[in-house]
Image (spheres, rainbow, N blue to C red):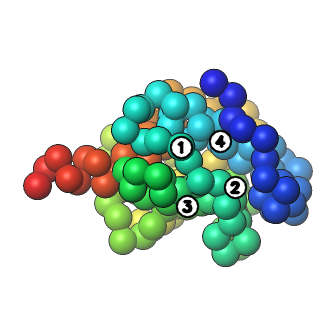
Amino acid sequence: MTAPPLPREVSRAYDAFPASIGKRLLWVRELIFAAAAAHEGIGRLTETLKWGEPAYLTEETGSGSTIRLGRLKDSAHAAILFNCKTTLVDTFRERFPDQFEYRQTRALLLPVSGKLPKQDLSVCLSLALTYHLDRRRKR
């Protein structure tokens, strides 16, 4: 499955990143759409801007927590940002302690070059896109 065409305003946001960060984040975007397609409970994603950055929402089903792509001011890494009120980043840190660099409870940081653990990152994205489904099951 390939990701749908970029909405114009989202495309502009990717273009505004330094080229190496934009390229890495577009790769993550592909993984987000692939993770959504692999899980029938996620539904169609909404691709929009939040705080001027590309954001992926599960508005159709409410299955997950918003994933935002960007960068942190004090870092040269690409950043996958999550709602800091969730346990997502703590879960990622627990499952993949040495795979990624993390920032508090809100971000997973990716170097802009080199090979990344695609499978592990896909697991993290899937956990975010199903966050509310998983929490509903535990109740």
Disc 1/disc 2 C-alpha distance (Å): 28 Å
- Badge 2 marks a residue whose secondary structure is loop
Which residue matches tag 1? 44
At label 1, the amino acid type is Arg
Disc 2/disc 4 C-alpha distance (Å): 13 Å
- Badge 3 marks a residue whose secondary structure is strand
Which residue matches tag 2? 77
At label 4, the amino acid type is Val
Query: How crowded is the residue under tag 4: few (<14 C-alpha within 10 Å), some, or many (20+)?
Result: many
At label 3, the amino acid type is Leu
Query: How crowded is the residue under tag 3: few (<14 C-alpha within 10 Å), some, or many (20+)?
Result: many
Q: Earlier in the sequence, mark 2 or mark 4?
A: 4
Disc 4/disc 1 C-alpha distance (Å): 17 Å
Q: Position of 19 compared to 63: left or right?
A: right
- Badge 4 marks a residue whose secondary structure is helix
Residue 69 at least partly seen: no
The location of residue 77, given as percent across then percent down, is 70, 55
Is the Cβ of the residue at disc 1 closer than 8 Å to that at disc 2?
A: no
Q: Earlier in the sequence, mark 1 or mark 3?
A: 1
Disc 2/disc 3 C-alpha distance (Å): 12 Å
Numbered disc in front, either 2 or 3:
3
Numbered disc in front, either 1 or 2:
1
Q: Position of 82 compared to 116: left or right?
A: left
Foreground pick, 67 / 24: 67
For the point 78% across and 53% down, which residue is it?
7
Which residue matches tag 4? 28
Residue 137 at least partly seen: yes
